[in-house]
Amino acid sequence: MEITRENLDSIALYPFRSESELMATLQEFIRIYNFERERIPELYDSEQGISAYLYYFFATNVPKGIELLKRIYERQRLSFESGPVIDIGMGPGSFLVSWLKFFPDFSNEVIGVDTADLMVEQAHEIFKTYFPNIKTTFKNNYRDVERKENATLCFTHSFNEMSEGEFMKILDYFKPERLLFMEPGTHEVFHKLKAIREKLINDLNYQVAYPCFSQATCPISLDSEDWCHQYVDVRHEVSIERLTQKLNKDRRNMPTIFHVYHKKNLEGKVDKSGIIFRILKETKFSYDFIVCSQIENSNQLRQVRLLKKQLKARGVSKKVIKSFIPGTDIKFKIVEEKNAFTIIELN
Ligand SMILES: C[S@@+](CC[C@H](N)C(=O)[O-])C[C@H]1O[C@@H](n2cnc3c(N)ncnc32)[C@H](O)[C@@H]1O
């Protein structure tokens, strides 16, 4: 499925009469998402709203999902393909499309749940047209989905729209082997998810596979102005890119919160050392970062420094370092502690 305006025109529930009608609907959408969150369910009540979602959020969330799956897979090959995938709050099926693009030979069941009838209708339209051979089950109520063994349960831009109580009920119903979140990269969502992280690890027998390197408590406290999120750098097809530019929104470099868990002792080991948390200002002789990594038995943030002369001597190009973004995994060894910095070398 190539995501272009033209292809989306043929599956959208509502035919926009003009570009300005689409723009106005999207601007209202974005305003409600940002400032009137209690009105979010209204957005999913009209064909016009669902189609606006399709052209902008679906179109840009599909490549984002693929990038994030790539990132976790580079770190740890979890057995995602060994069981069904269930997306709660699937919308038009954005992440399920990412999943099928990332795992083109996926042969297990693809399940989506969404309380909005029109989202489910839109998902049917997409899958009927583009994935006619995939066995799908789409429902409004998660209790209408049979419990499945060995499932991956996903929450994609939906966890932030539900209460913690609702989330816990769904988790308890499915008791999945693997659990994945892809959510907006905000301070509020981070802390909501951080509370769940501690519960999953301490009370429910899960291990975190991403983004943390150890099961120890997260080092970021509620009163900190900073929060853990990752950036995803994606490219969109020209007609979609033009739409995001007209809206004056950057959907290429998207802040996101991506977490993955699996049942304890289920999966293999990881050989990376840390994840870039923040990029600091480049100096004349170094690139500086804050990295979150395991130190003894805890997760800690530390200021690390890569010396330019060492990088040059080892033939590491500037381009590699410049490609680092919050969320990039790095493998390093410590050279020495100097002033407030840990001098490191990349492995
Ligand atoms: C922002 S959309 C995300 C859609 C899609 N997952 C994506 O990433 O593009 C959030 C979706 O979650 C659904 N949703 C919110 N709370 C839900 C719940 N408790 N159970 C099922 N779906 C829910 C909404 O109806 C909406 O379609």
Image: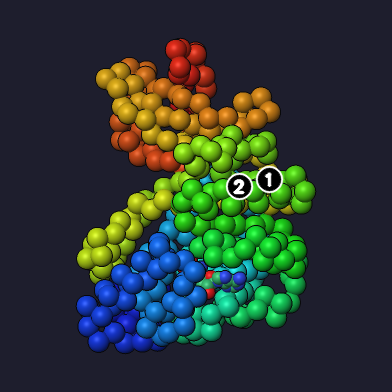
> Element under label 1?
helix
- Quadrant containing the N terminus in the rendered view: bottom left
- Which residue has dot 2 on it? 194
Q: Position of residue 55 (x, y in %)?
A: 34, 74
Q: Are the residues tagged 1 and 2 within 8 Å (C-beta)?
A: yes
Between 59 and 245, which is closer to the camera in this rendering? 245
Between 334 and 279, which is closer to the camera in this rendering? 279
Q: Where is residue 98 in the image (x, y as percent from the top left)?
A: 48, 65
- Which residue has dot 1 on it? 198
| 106 displayed left or right of 9 | right
Which quadrant of the view contains residue 234?
bottom left
> Element under label 2?
helix
- What residue is rendered at 62% in x and 26% in y? 295
Above or below 92: residue 62: above
- What residue is rendered at 31% in x and 27% in y? 282
Above or below 129: residue 23: above
Q: Which mark is residue 110?
A: none
Above or below 44: residue 154: above
